[in-house]
Image (cartoon, coloured by chain):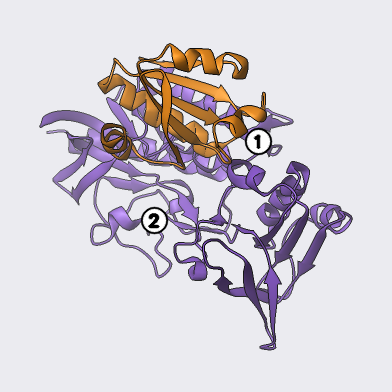
Amino acid sequence: METRQVDVLILGGGVAGMTAAVYAARAGLRVTLLEENACGGLVNWTRVVENMPSYISIPGMELADRMAEQVAALGVDVEEAACIEEISLAAGDKTVVADDVRYEARAVIAATGRRPVLLDCAGDCCQVHYCAICDGSAYKGRHVLVVGGGNSGFDEALALLDTGVARVTLIEAQDRFFAAAAAQRALAAREGAVMYTSTRVTQLHGTDALESVTLTRADGSEQQLPCDGIFVFMGQEPSTQLFRGQLELDAQGYIVTDGLMATSVPGVFAAGDVRPKRYRQITTALSDGTVAALEAERYIRRTAG
Amino acid sequence: MSLQTVTPGDLDARIEQTAQGIVLFHKELCPHCKNMEKVLAKFGAKNPDVELLAVDSEADPAVMEAYGVERVPSLVIVRGGRAVYTRTGLMNPKELTTLYHSV
C-alpha cells in the first residue's frame, strides 16, 4: 500500500474543511483533503445563498465550486469520492487509510459535517426520497408526502409542485412550522398543497410500491393517506461514525471541542457542523475552519521534533 | 477518459458509436449528480478505455423517457453500441466498478 505523509489531513470538503485547507496551505503546510462526495457539503444542497457577505445572491453550487477552485489553486491535494476504510487517531499517530492509500498526518481536522435524518419507518421502500430535484420528476401528476416543516420542507414542497407534482401533503411533528413566514404563505397559497402540524408518518403501505401511509396525530388519532412518494426533510445529524471510540462525542454524536477547535486527542481538531453549536451557518463554518487550521499549524510547529 | 457532454439529440448516435461506456443522466442543480460526476472521474482514471458521457436531462426531458430513466442521477451502461443496463442513484467508486464489470 502506498503511504503518503502530510502535515494536515482534512476529513470533509464542505465549507469548514475547504476554509481550513486554504489557511493551512497558505501557512506553507502539506495539505490533503479527503471528501466522500463532491466538495461543497451542504452548500451544494442550497439552491441560493443570500447571506454570504460579498455575494448578494449566489447559487450554492457555484459558491462551493468557487471555494474548491481556490483550494485547488493553492496546491492542496483534494481527493473527492474518497472511501475512508480505516482511521486511527492518537497523539503520536494519526493515520487514515482511504482508497488503498495510507495517510500519515501530523495534524488532522475533522470536518465531516452532517447528513439527513432518515425516516424511521421507511424500511427498504424505494419511494422514500431525500432530494426533490433528483427524484421529483418521477411524480408528475401524482401525490407526494413531504415530511418536515422547516425551510427545506417548504422550499422543496414548492419545488415539487413546480415540477408538476399534482398534490403535496406536508406534515410536521411539532405543533408549529419552522419555515420562514414567506415560504409558509407561498405554499399555503398553492393549489394542491395541504399542511398539517402535530402529525407524523408512522407506517407505509403498498405491495410492490408505496400506495398509502398512516398519519398519526399528537392526540393519537390516525388517518390513511393515499400517496405515491415521500420526500423527507427532517433535519440533519452529525456524520461522526468514523470517530466513535476515537474522539470524545457528546450525547447527540457531535465532536466535543474547546473554543479553539481542539478535540480530545492532541493534534486533532474539528470544524463546522460536526461540532455542537447553536448557529450552523456558512459564516460560522468559515470561522471554525480558519481557527482549526491556525491551531493545527501552531500544534505542528510546537511539536516539531 | 474524462466525462464528455452530449446533447440529447446526439445521444442515440453517440451510443451507437460506443464500444464500451457509461452515460450519466443528470440535472444541473442536482447535488447527487455532482457527486456522481466525481465518482465517474475516479472510475474513469482507472478505466481509460471506457467512454464517459453526460447528458442534461432537463435540456430535453423526452430523452429520459426514451431510455427508461425517471430520476437522476441515472447511469446507462453501453456495450457494443447498445444500452444494456440502467441504474439509478448514487454509488461510490468501488460499487460502480463492481457493477460495471458484472453487467
Q: In the image, what residue occupies the spot 29% across and 20% down?
A: B45
Q: Which mark is residue A275?
A: none
Q: Quadrant of residue A175?
A: bottom right
Residue type, label 1: Met
A286 is higher (above) or lower (below) than A182: above
Name the residue beneath numbered marker 1: A52
Residue type, label 2: Asp
Secondary structure at badge 2 equals: loop
- Of all chains in the rendering, the one displayed in orange is B
Residue A22 appears left or right of A42: left
Residue A198 appears left or right of A304: right
Q: In the image, what residue occupies the spot 53% across and 18% down?
A: B12
- Of all chains in the rendering, the one displayed in purple is A
Q: Position of residue A31 (x, y in %)?
A: 30, 28
Quarter of the image with the C terminus of chain A is: top left
Q: Position of residue A202 (x, y in %)?
A: 57, 76
The answer to whether tags 1 and 2 share a subunit is yes
Q: Which mark is residue A258?
A: 2
The answer to whether residue A74 is visible is no
Q: Nearer the viewer, residue B33 or B67?
A: B67
- Residues at badges 1 and 2 in contact (C-beta under 8 Å)? no
Residue A72 appears left or right of A166: left
Q: Nearer the viewer, residue A271 or A261?
A: A271
The answer to whether residue A186 is visible is yes
Quarter of the image with the N terminus of chain A is: top left
Q: In the image, what residue occupies the spot 27% across and 21% down?
A: B47
Q: Quadrant of residue A80?
A: top left
Q: In the image, what residue occupies the spot 64% across and 69% down?
A: A212
A182 is higher (above) or lower (below) than A32: below
Mark 1 / mark 2, whichever is N-terminal: 1
